[in-house]
Amino acid sequence: MTKKIGFIGIGMMGHGMAKNLLAKGFPLTFKVNRNRDNLTDLIAAGAKEANTNAECAQASDIVFICVTGSPQVEQIVYGPQGLLESGRAGLIVVDTSTAEPSSSARIRNDLAAKGIKLIDAPLARTPKEAEEGRLNTMVGAEPEDFKTLEPVLKAFCENIFHIGPPGHGHVLKLVNNMMAMSFAAATAEAFAVAAKSGLDLHRVYDVVSAGGVNCGIFQMMATKTLKEGDVTGFKFGIANAQKDLRYYTHLAEMLPVSSLIGEATHQSLIQASNAGFSDKLIASLFEAQEKLNDVKIVPR
């Protein structure tokens, strides 16, 4: 039988995921977390809106949560009419956020006491791929639960990785984001040094693009920025990156593992936020470097 899907959080990523679930024939009930600007096409496609998280859970076999991070997930689970209070035995909850592993472990244990399963399936790629049904996901689940969930994930994912037991998805997402944000921060800093020294930044771009340092992160950071003065090429927010690196450094500390690069990257994101760029996208790390070091990187 086709699983009935609940979806909590119709934001930049969630809208595309929900749209593709509907297109693949899954009955869908959604609960808005904050944004009500992009619901018309979902309702036209047959989605039903729930007024509460409890109503969403009660209408569903599987509930996806797609919100910013652990505080929002905890509110959905533990808050009034939350999933812990209202979910029935057999419900599967899928957390697609980038969450703090210690919080997820507590939620998983509390839900399990009521016969509810929590699966972590954080996402990679951007809202563009969400709309296209081409996201990547890394799933932490027992094999039988992954088997149940995989056909549903195929509605909006191009690549689905079962990477281990519950919890491993969230850990891998933090490791992945640490590497991505470290390279983004290093790129912004390197261009500040290049600009201060008087190098032609387009020549810097050409040389890096032709060599081993080139990668997708570099191109998302630098191509639109240098060629068009457009700092929106990397569709990920500085505030979210700062949150993810905070989770990563907490995880490293708890293991414990030294995290010199992770800590430095976290501090560079804090510095950019303190300079007024917390609501900007990652390529605005170039703008933060301009402000902090009195250099010009972004053509205007």
Image: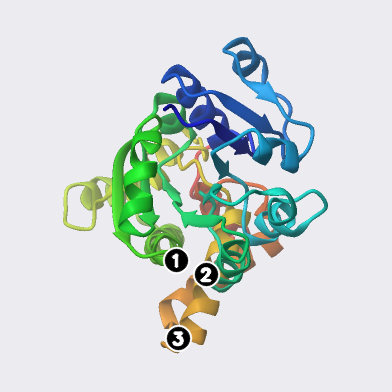
Structural crowding at the residue carrying mark 2, measured as other residues with C-alpha within 10 Å and reported as few (<14), some (14–19) or many (≥20): many
Q: Position of residue 81 (x, y in %)?
A: 80, 48
Residue 167 numbered tag? 1
Marks 1/2 in contact by CB < 8 Å: the verdict is: yes
Q: Quadrant of residue 106?
A: bottom right
Q: How far is the residue under mark 2 from the one under mark 3?
A: 11 Å
On screen, residue 160 above or below 243: above
In the rendered structure, which amino acid carries the disc numbered 2?
Pro
- Quadrant into which the N terminus falls: top left
Marks 2,3: beta carbons within 8 A: no
Upstream in sequence: badge 2 or badge 3? 2
The residue carrying mark 2 is: 101
- For label 1, the SS is loop
Amino acid type of the residue tagged 3 in the rendering = Leu
**Image: 171 above or below 206:** below
Please state which amino acid type lies under the numbered disc 1. Gly
